[in-house]
Amino acid sequence: MAFVEPVALEGRHVRIEPLAHEHAEGVRAAAADGELWRLWYTSVPAPDKTTEWIDIALDVRQRLGAMPFVVREKPGGDIVGATRYFNVDAPNRRLEIGHTWYAKRAQRTAVNTECKLLLLTHAFEALGCIAVEFRTSSFNFQSREAIARLGAKQDGILRSHQILPDGTLRDTVVFSIIAPEWPAVKRHLVFRLEK
């Protein structure tokens, strides 16, 4: 049995469900809202690369135990983004939440807060994780601020961590939440959603 099994998570504002090929059109439409693939520091699929992006995500799920998700906005059910459990380290009960992006209309709404609450609750309370990590490009200031607002602590910066498709080097900012911090972080996220 895999450490991370397919699961759907549902709250008041969003439903998170395992990524599948039938989500291609919804993923394409969500990425088009804001032309997110044009942000050089993200990995959002361009319209003509959506199928390839899904194939890669599902391959990583099969080979490495990751779990890619689509995010549906409620009550309408439109796909407004994607996120993923990955870098799964079952023996050490750790994983990373990332590859997260949202359509422009879903940014700075309750969508991200509730997605993270659902994913973190499942990670800490169902999977028994001792730590959950977040990583982003040092140039993705919006993402860095959003991760810090969740209550994650910055662990450090991995310099020249990745070679991007255009050949530039990415510095990666690493954040985490550890199990003893989870009750306070959870309370904070619930409070933010109630406001």
Image: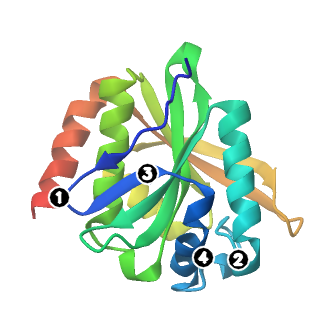
User: In the rendered structure, which disc, 1 or 2, sits on the residue that comes first in sequence?
Assistant: 2
User: Is residue 102 in sight in this rendering?
Assistant: yes
Residue at 65%, 39% in the rendered image: 61
Location of residue 106 (image quadrant): bottom left
- On residue 46, the disc is 2
Q: Residues within 10 Å of mark 2 (few under 14, many from 20)?
A: some
CA gap, disc 4 and disc 3: 16 Å
In this rendering, is residue 130 above or below 193?
A: above
User: In the rendered structure, which disc, 4 or 2, sits on the residue that comes first in sequence?
Assistant: 4
Q: Position of residue 95 (x, y in %)?
A: 53, 32
2 vs 3, front mark = 3
User: Mark 1 sits on what residue?
Assistant: 192
* Type of amino acid at the residue the image marks with label 1: Arg
CA gap, disc 2 and disc 3: 21 Å
Q: Position of residue 21 (x, y in %)?
A: 63, 59
Q: Are marks 1 and 3 in contact (CB under 8 Å)?
A: no
Residue at 39%, 74% in the rendered image: 107
User: Mark 3 sits on what residue?
Assistant: 17
* Type of amino acid at the residue the image marks with label 4: Arg
Q: Residues within 10 Å of mark 3 (few under 14, many from 20)?
A: some
- Tell me if 153 is positioned left or right of 20 in this view: left
**Regarding mark 3 in the picture, which secondary structure is present there?**
strand
Q: Are marks 1 and 4 in contact (CB under 8 Å)?
A: no
**Regarding mark 1 in the picture, which secondary structure is present there?**
helix
In this rendering, is residue 121 above or below 30?
A: above
Q: Are marks 4 and 3 in contact (CB under 8 Å)?
A: no
1 vs 4, front mark = 4
